[in-house]
Image: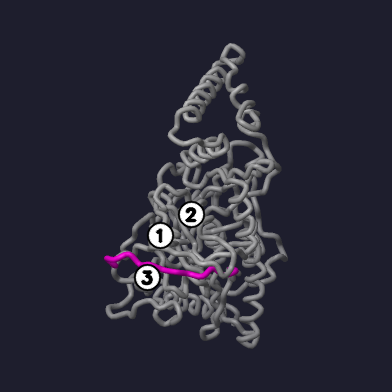
Amino acid sequence: MKITRIGAALLAGTSFAFGIALAPGGTALFQALEIRSAAAQGTDQQQAYRLLALFADVLRQVRSDYVDPVSDRTLVENALNGMLTGLDPHSAYMTEKQWHEMRTETSGQFGGVGLELTDNAGLIQVVSPIDGTPASRAGMKPGDLITSVNGKSVEGLSLDDAITAMRGPPNTVLHLIVKRQGVEDPIVLTLTRQMIHIETVKSRLIGGIGVIRISEFTEQTDSGVHAALKSLRAEAGGRLDGLILDLRNDPGGLLDQAIAVSNDFLDHGGIVSTRGRHPSDNESWSAKAGAAAVAPHLPVVVLTNNGTASAAEIVAAALQDDNRALVLGTRSFGKGSVQTLIPLNGNGALRLTTARYYTPSGRSIQGLGITPNVEVEETRTPQSHFGPEHESDLRHILTNDGGSQAEAPPPPADLPAEARNIQKLPPVGWPALDPEKPATDYQLQQGLVLVRAMAAQVRAASR
């Protein structure tokens, strides 16, 4: 999944690895790497110096004999990115341009065609098109593989570089070639870029139940939830019966926004904690009493699927563990790690995995995902995927370390009887899903059944 935007903090700059600065022409780098192990103190340092000398030898050889001249900056940036992507699927080195684009993206607007993307075994896969964008209007679908950008193959192109290639000023043209599951011939698309304003929160009222859809967690998400609740209450004449929080296909985003949205529904209890290598990485966040001004008491059902990841999983798990909501759908993606964004003094930034996060009950969902209280599939027939469907399908994933349990916590003792009667699969003949027609969305419809039953329990208890 494209889950590259969750960060615990934006930290102050740091220096180049081992304190070595890259001077023009690479001279300082070569001089620093010439230090021999005799100057080292201890076995670990000796090994480090030997490996640095090896790196210098390879760099010098490539610089001298590669078929075309290559700048030292290109070689070092490639080496940095290889070093980080070999650690886990979510660590990476970003050039200054990529770092700028990430900051632009999390602000909620940028020039492009409106695609959420992920890296799939060296190919660029669409997670989802953003509603109302050129990609959406062109009919691009989740699971599409982008094989060519502006006439050039994406093979060997990093995800960040692919995103850079697709971004550009509004009113410029982008040519894509797409491979789609079940379609034999390549699909050729010509799109015109526009300024993308990400509306991460959308809402609708269905028979007294408010449905809030969060597509990702950017800087505007929490304020969007507040605005959606205000609008829903006004539309319902001040009498909302319950809420559905739709986090399906939400790839995550900013940690602080996940915490804020969780606190919108909680007035006590934990939200999330992190544990890392250093004590400074160990933090915990709890709901602040009186801060749940949005919806502290309404019955809530959270919808999840295999595309619910990262920050979205934090929200779902917090509400589930604190018995604030029931989760309905399928197992979530299972990204239980936190990436810290570390600027490098004008040389880009690191996106470095620095901690695992844990739910209020102590669960680590890393590689496991969140198990719903009520399991409901989208269709009767399993859908074909180019992959990956879950974190556990990726290479070099972190181990699940220190989690107290893998399964969902036991459901509340007063779980509505209707929850036990909800069928996992749609009935034979259920219509194909059309996002514009809620009646075709089986998971949403079962969520409505469940939240109405919860609302009936609340009314009965108050009599």
Mark 3 surroundings within 10 Å by alpha-carbon count, few (fewer than 14), some (14 through 19), many (20 or more) = many
* Dot 3 or dot 2, earlier in sequence: 2
Q: How is the image coloured?
A: one colour
- Which mark, residue 146? 1
Residues 158 and 324: in front is 158
Q: Which residue is drawn at the image coordinates 42% and 76% (left, top)?
A: 446
Q: Which residue is drawn at the image coordinates 43% and 62% (left, top)?
A: 126
C-alpha distance separating marks 3 and 2 = 31 Å
* Dot 1 or dot 3, earlier in sequence: 1
* Label 2–label 1 contact, CB within 8 A: yes
Tally the numbered discs.
Answer: 3
Residues 2 and 433: in front is 2
* Label 3–label 2 contact, CB within 8 A: no
Image x and y of residue 182, in percent: 28, 66
Q: Mark 3: which amino acid?
A: Glu
Q: Helix, strand, or loop for circle 2?
A: helix
Residue 414 visible to an observer of this rendering: no
C-alpha distance separating marks 1 and 3 = 25 Å
Whether 186 is among the magenta residues is yes
Residue, disc 3: 378
Mark 1 surroundings within 10 Å by alpha-carbon count, few (fewer than 14), some (14 through 19), many (20 or more) = many
Residue, disc 2: 162
Residue 36 visible to an observer of this rendering: yes
Above or below 445: residue 17:
above
Magenta segment, prevailing SS (helix, strand or loop): strand
When asked about the image quadrant of residue 440, the answer is bottom left
Q: Mark 2: which amino acid?
A: Ala
Whether 9 is among the magenta residues is no
Task: Give the side of residue 222 with respect to residue 388, left or right.
Answer: right
Q: Mark 1: which amino acid?
A: Ile
